[in-house]
Structures are given as structure tokens and as C-alpha cells.
Amino acid sequence: MKQLYKELTVMTTAAVLCVALASTTAMAGVRVTDAQTSAAAKAAAEALSPESVIANLEETVVQEKSQAAVEEKAAKDAWEKAEQLLEEAAEKEEKEAEEATKQKAEEAVSEKAVTDTAEQTMKEVTEAAAAEAAALKELGLSADARVKVTADELDLLAAIIYCEAGGEEITGKVAVGAVVLNRVLSTEFENTIAEVIYAPGQFTPAMTGLLDQVLAEGVNEECYAAARAALNGENPVEGCLYFNSGSGSGIQIGNQHFY
């Protein structure tokens, strides 16, 4: 509407100027013909005629409506774009939140699985250690025995002690058991009592069958005591791996020498 008022003001001013120009010219003595004066008056009248004013008014209204429509559409488009961006941002945020929640849940499950596995492993190790300690205790051995053995292996160790040092004092018997255990723990020999004792060419009673005979008949308690002492850590021969009764060298215990 401001534009309309501006245009009406311009038209009115133009008409007034035309009339004033005609009058001024006449007063100044300028020769103006009646036709010229009439034309100026006619132009002014046409500029101020209702039809002209209405036509200009309608054209201005149409322009303003068109401009308003353009502005309204631009505002609507901008609003719709803003709404779309807000929706996309909300969807993105929701998706990220879901993914974060899912990841946390997966991490919690994984952590629990690791914890459960560790606890189960620890439980199994603890139970196994307890069972092993109980078995050793039942055999008269300590939980930190030099070599963990079964009842059969204890029998075998006592039997080889009987075969090799049955007539010796308790220290001589323990010394033979200690040599067997030194071999089990050495990288130069096998890893079990049975493998060490039955290794080819090592213990004569094992090769002649005497050892098996002694096992079948049973061994006296002193040989068992010597075997338990050696297993529980008693070692009068230190790191010796061999013994015999005729070399004359090494550590002598009773009738035997250990080296």
C-alpha cells in the first residue's frame, strides 16, 4: 500500500505541475497556443481521471499480491526446509543413541562373558588344585611336593628304592629316591617316574623283572617313608643323577656313591 500511495502522489504532483507550468508560461509572456494549453490540461485531467487512478491502483495491487505470494512461498519453503532439517537431525540423534545403547549392551555382554569365563577358569583351577592337594595329602605328601604323583607312581618309587637300597639306612634309601626325582626334573631324562625307571639300560631291576616282582609282592613301610621324604623335598645328594656301589667317587652314603 505504501507503494500505491507513493504512485498516487507522483501522479497528482505531475498533474499539478502541468497546470502550474501552463499558468507560469502564460504569465511570463511566453506565447502558448490554445492547443498547447488544451493538451496540457487534457493530460492533467487524464492523469487524475478515476479510470487512470483505478487502473494504476489495480496494477499496483496485483504487483503487491504477486510479491506477497512470492514472499509467502519463500517463507513456506524455508519453514518446510527447516522442519525437514530438524526431523533429519532428530532421526540421526535417535539412531546414534540406539547404536550407542546397542554397543554398550554388547560390551556389557562381552565383559560378562569374559568375567564368567575367568571365574569359571579360576574355579576349575582352584578345584583342580584342591583335588590334587587332597590326593597328595591322602598319600602322605605335601601340596608342594617336588613331583606330583599318583598312588601307582608312589608304589613304583618305593619299589625301586627297595630294589636298589633295600639294605641301606633310611638316608641311603632317600638318596636313591632323590636321584629318580632329579632325573624326572632334568631335561636330560624323561618327565615321569615310570618313564625314568623303565628307560632302557638305566635301572637293572627294571630290566631283569625284579622290580615288577617287588611291586606284586609289596614293599615295606620304610621304603614308602623314604619315597615320601624324597617327594616332600628331602635331598641328601643335591643334583646327582647317577649312583653305584663301586665307583668310589661323588657323595658316599652307606655303600653307594652318588654323582
Image: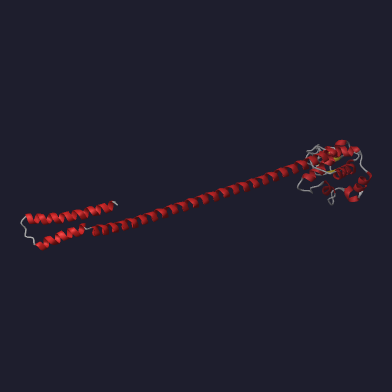
In this rendering, the answer to whether 134 lies above or below 77 is above
Residue 257 appears in the rendering: no
Farthest residue to the right: give it: 217
Q: Splitting the image into 4 quarters, where does residue 214 fall?
A: top right
Residue 151 appears in the rendering: yes
Q: Where is residue 110 in the image (x, y as percent from the top left)?
A: 65, 47
Query: Measuring 77% from the left and 41% from the top, which residue is drawn there?
Result: 127
Q: Which colour scheme is used?
A: secondary structure
Farthest residue to the front: give it: 50
Q: Position of residue 154 (x, y in %)?
A: 86, 42
- Residue placed most toward the observer, 188 or 258: 188
Query: Measuring 9% from the left and 56% from the top, which residue is drawn there?
Result: 25
Q: Splitting the image into 4 quarters, where does residue 21 fall?
A: bottom left
- Residue placed most toward the observer, 99 or 201: 99
Q: Where is residue 10 in the image (x, y as percent from the top left)?
A: 21, 54
Q: Where is residue 181 in the image (x, y as percent from the top left)?
A: 81, 43
> Where, quadrant-wise, is the C terminus in this rendering?
top right
Q: In this view, does 218 lie to the left or right of 24?
A: right
Q: In this view, does 102 lie to the left or right of 13?
A: right
- Residue placed most toward the observer, 45 or 60: 45
Q: In this view, does 78 lie to the left or right of 124?
A: left
Farthest residue to the left: give it: 29
Q: How many marks?
A: 0
